[in-house]
Amino acid sequence: AQSVTQPDIHITVSEGASLELRCNYSYGATPYLFWYVQSPGQGLQLLLKYFSGDTLVQGIKGFEAEFKRSQSSFNLRKPSVHWSDAAEYFCAVGARGGYQKVTFGTGTKLQVIP
Amino acid sequence: GAVVSQHPSWVICKSGTSVKIECRSLDFQATTMFWYRQFPKQSLMLMATSNEGSKATYEQGVEKDKFLINHASLTLSTLTVTSAHPEDSSFYICSARTGTSVPEQYFGPGTRLTVT
């Protein structure tokens, strides 16, 4: 079965600083990979996804993520964080085939300080 | 595009009653919809996968007689929490897939259920 680990429960960065959120997955083959963002009391918004091809993917709001097969990682990055980026971020892995079930990590809460 | 709505956004019900939550895909046809449950400060737990016109597939540990899921059309799925109890209080989120070959899901805004 697939699984996702987000080792950082909570991260605090200063506005304007760079950001990297870690994500490691376990899956028997190359999975589908996603990053979602959730604001308090809201649903999830897709930031970016990796299906195949170029391992560096660009998303919305200036985010990018890099798939590293050798490390089973899909870390999310942003060069300069804005106060509005404060939210909960979820990494997710999707199975290829069947119902293409998606499994979510436990989330990383991002706090941005001025 | 790919907008999913949920109704209601929040609901309070008394213990022992049933409550229905609707999930609609507004600008696309969703052959597959998913229902998740999220406890405070925790991740999303998949409850069930529903395909239009067929019975839902429930995850292990989810009571199918308690959480009734109906996916009667390509744009509507409903989750009915039957005989609700305080421990059913949670944030319920639905999502929909735009196609059978596309694994990404689009999420609704969620429904906060409080059982008193």
Image (spheres, rainbow, N blue to C red):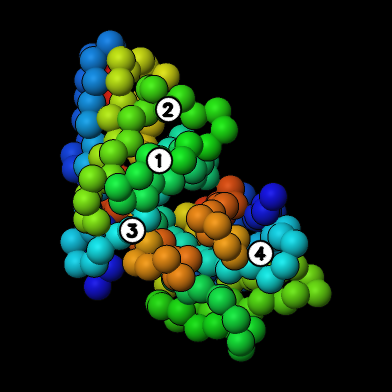
Q: Nearer the viewer, residue B83 or B58?
A: B58
Residue situated furthest front in the rendering: B54
Tell me the element at label 3.
loop
Query: What residue appears at the point 56 percent right and 76 percent down from the top-left corner?
Result: A51
Cα separation, mark 3 vs mark 2, equals 20 Å
Location of residue B83 with respect to B96 vertically, above or below: above
Q: Is residue B9 left or right of residue B86?
A: left
Q: Nearer the viewer, residue A86 or B12?
A: B12
Residue situated furthest right in the rendering: A70
Q: Chain letter of disc 4? A: A
Query: What residue appears at the point 24 percent right and 56 percent down from the top-left corner?
Result: B74
Q: Which mark is residue B56?
A: 1
The N terminus of chain B appears in which quarter of the rendering?
A: bottom left
Q: Is residue B71 left or right of residue B99?
A: left
Q: Which mark is residue B64?
A: 2
Instruction: State yes or no: discs 1 and 2 in contact (Cβ < 8 Å).
Output: yes
Q: Which mark is residue A22?
A: 4
